[in-house]
Amino acid sequence: MNTIGILTSGGDAPGMNSAIRAAVRTALNNGMRIKGIRNGYDGLMKGDIYEMNVPSVADIIHKGGTILGTARSTDFTNKEGQERGAQILSDYGIEGLIVIGGDGSFKGANALSGLGIKTIGIPGTIDNDMGYTDYTIGFFTAIETVSDAIGKLRDTSSSHGRAVVIEVMGRNCGDLALYSGLAGGGESIIVPEHEFSIEDIVAKMEHGRKRGKLHHLITLAEGVGDPYSIAHELEEKTGIETKVTVLGHVQRGGTPSSVDRLLGSTMGARAVELLLDEQTDLAIGYVDGKLIEVSIEEAVSKKSQFDESLYELANNLSK
């Protein structure tokens, strides 16, 4: 294999640049050419493709986001668009493609593999919602971002004697709410994997107030419920002023953590090695401290396993 391509797709995640840097340098070290595709599958469909070299990835390991850009593409979602995408790659001499993103991005890689383009997927999403891997690139940085926000909200909530509902990202996965809530010392954690009871939270708030606690921090995974309705109901039932903070896209930004840089670097290098071995339709993951590979079909179909023991610990520590 002489020439490969690389793109980032879907939501950006801190650590993607580490994977891009490792892939580019590993490819060049092995005598291969590597071309960057700007703005994901949308850029592919537009032929927004350029030659990458060592200077292309200089001083990016510490930067958040993705230097390649990312965008969603409606043109690439159907068979005709995917065939055109495969033809564009062939026209540019690209024989293999590294795709960094979530399950939607992986499905695109799977389609291209079926059309003769060798593809390798790298999991990049702050949601950590891909069940075949313990962790995805960007997850640990997002935990740090949310934990930092929780600490600052604790300061102001204690000053005013308030409770606060903190909505975090995660789609249908509660990992970010759980890990950041536990790391930040939150009193209540609401996730899609468990039904929550307003009465239980009310009881916690009232118990905390009786023993002199001036704040109550509630970490809410997006999509479980409306944070403003939850806050309103809690305030009505407890008489404790309850505010809402929706962290939003700030969770995707920031300097990637050391863990995300390591994940990105090792996965980016491994992706090139797999393409050198003419492998295709594989997703790289991280399980029990080691890199693994599974079929992309398995990667997108395997449901994420919620850490029940961690959830129980968080509840026990907040009593």
Image (cartoon, rainbow, N blue to C red):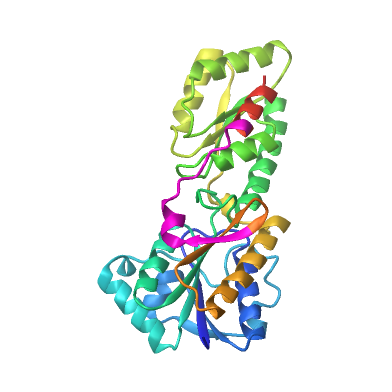
Residue 200 percent across, percent down from the top left: 54, 17
Residue lying at 41% horizontally and 52% vertically, measured from the top left: 301
Front position in the image: 6 or 14: 6
Q: What range is drawn magenta here? A: 291-309
Residue lying at 61% horizontally and 56% vertically, measured from the top left: 286
Front position in the image: 281 or 20: 281
Query: Can you say whether 62 is above or below 165 in the image?
Result: below
Residue 205 appears in the figure: yes
| Residue 297: in magenta span | yes
Quadrant of residue 86 within the rendered picture: bottom left
Query: Can you say whether 298 is above or below 224 in the image?
Result: below
Residue 164 percent across, percent down from the top left: 59, 29
Q: How many marks?
A: 0
Residue 205 percent across, percent down from the top left: 61, 17
Residue 36 appears in the figure: no
For the C terminus, give its image quadrant: top right
Residue lying at 66% horizontally and 66% vertically, measured from the top left: 266
Query: Can you say whether 22 is above or below 253 in the image?
Result: below
Residue 273 percent across, percent down from the top left: 59, 75
| Residue 207: in magenta span | no
The furthest residue to the left? 80
Residue lying at 47% horizontally and 82% vertically, measured from the top left: 49
Say left or right for 258 vs 294: right
The furthest residue to the top? 210
